[in-house]
């Protein structure tokens, strides 16, 4: 594939927050995910990166993904993933434990005797 062919790969425009950590550095940086495809993404944030730098990004519902900085333009930069991902997973609601019932759905534990209620 040529560079022009890579630009034709379908990308989802979206706005998510993600954490980025550079290879060899322990600190994480918060970035905005501007678009996402199976092979890469565009991030926006004040992170000092260089072209070709290896990094990891923590994407919602996907987890940590390894990548390489492909390009830099001001405070935006492109990341090419080492392995393809399913970008639709990042759009889905955050996954919670399936055995955990939301608080607003749980039944009332103590039943009130209706004969003791006062009518207004």
Image: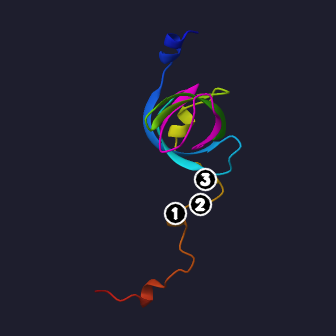
Q: Earlier in the sequence, mark 2 or mark 3?
A: 3
Front disc: 1 or 3: 3
Quarter of the figure that contains the N terminus = top right
Disc 2 target residue: 101
* Image disc number at residue 105: 1
- The residue closer to the viewer here, 75 or 105, is 75
Q: Is residue 51 magenta?
A: yes
Find numbered disc 3 in the image and state the secondary structure of the residue it sits on.
loop
Front disc: 2 or 3: 3
Please tell me whether residue 52 is drawn above or below residue 92 in the rendered image. above
What residue do we see at 52% from left, 63% from top?
Answer: 105
Q: Is residue 61 magenta?
A: yes
Measured as percent of width and height from the top left, residue 25 is found at 68, 47
Find numbered disc 1 in the image and state the secondary structure of the residue it sits on.
helix
State how far apart marks 2 and 3 are (Cα).
Answer: 10 Å
Q: Which region of the structure is painted magenta?
A: 37-62
* Image disc number at residue 96: 3
């Amino acid at each position: 594939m040529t560079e022009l062919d890579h630009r034709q790969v379908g990308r989802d425009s979206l706005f998510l927050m993600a954490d980025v950590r550079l290879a060899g550095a322990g600190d994480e940086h918060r970035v905005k995910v501007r678009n996402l495809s199976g092979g890469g993404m565009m991030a926006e944030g004040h992170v000092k990166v260089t072209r070709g730098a290896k990094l990891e990004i923590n994407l919602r519902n996907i987890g940590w993904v390894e990548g390489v900085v492909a390009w830099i333009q001001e405070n935006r930069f492109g990341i090419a993933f080492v392995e393809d991902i399913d970008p639709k997973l990042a759009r889905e609601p955050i996954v919670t434990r399936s055995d955990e019932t939301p608080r607003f759905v749980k039944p009332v534990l103590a039943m009130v005797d209706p004969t003791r209620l006062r009518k207004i």
